[in-house]
Amino acid sequence: MTSPENPQLDTADYFTRLAATYGSGEYYRKRRKAAVVEICREIGRVESLLDLGCGNGTYSAAFRASGLAKVLVGGDLSLGMLREARRRGAASALLACDASVLPFQSGSFEAIFCSHVLQFVADLPRCLDEIARCLKSGGIFIVAGGEFGVRERLQILVGDERWAQFARELPRPRGAGVRRNLVEYKQAAESAGLVVTHRKVEFNGSWADLAEFYRVRWLPLLEPFSQASLSATLDAITAERGSEQISLTESLLFCRKPAL
């Protein structure tokens, strides 16, 4: 039984399918905790923070619990994600918005945060210009996301042939065919006038955590037959090597707007 090769969805529809599960599980929890600790250490407490591409509010809720920002605003393209974020009480305010056309006055926020969002933005330079515009003088833009190796590690266990099958069947957001990296994010931020510092955050996980990550991140996007097939593969990985500990990293870019 086969599925259409690389079916595409509108970005909002793509993430609406993930609204109930995205950010759940031990891998996401450990990665998020490590990032939030580092962000709090770097910027302290701020008056206002925009979680851009907030999704279902997992990071917003973590920021709120940490006391990072007095006013916390979440913005996302997916109404399904925003409904879930509202249900969780993740932020002071939530609104639908396009990252490349932000509906805020210039200098609205002391900090803006994006977690694994920029790869889905069609016009990256315009997006960074908008973010820089919305930052206060001396404000900071924080990017979480980069080459942290999860896909590559799991591919080794699954095997090339089986991995290729799943890769063909996974839907993709329309227009998001290019895998961007931290170098591109850094260049776009610098072109927008921001001063960039790169930091890697380490955390420990297990193969069971990575298998759970794929259940959360990919299974809701697949058709039932493919869901069952991938689920069986992940069950086998967990049974064979689930308790084995591995070192993982998350990349953070701290992009500071020069003070006037």
Image (cartoon, rainbow, N blue to C red):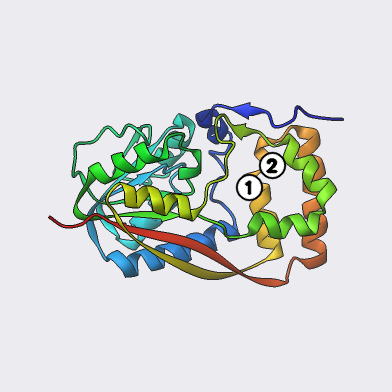
Residue 7 at x, y percent in the picture: 68, 28
Tell me what residue is drawn at x 50 percent, y 30 percent: 12
Q: Residues within 10 Å of mark 2 (few under 14, many from 20)?
A: some
- Mark 2 is on which residue type? Leu
Residue under label 2, please give it: 219
Give the CA separation, mark 2 to mark 1: 6 Å
- Mark 1 is on which residue type? Val
Residue 92 at x, y percent in the picture: 29, 44
Q: Is residue 3 above or below residue 46?
A: above
Q: Residues within 10 Å of mark 1 (few under 14, many from 20)?
A: many
Residue under label 1, please give it: 216
Q: Nearer the viewer, residue 199 or 34?
A: 199
Q: Is residue 106 left or right of residue 256?
A: left
Q: Is residue 81 above or below residue 233?
A: above
Residue extending furthest toward the left = 260
Tell me what residue is drawn at x 76 percent, y 33 percent: 224
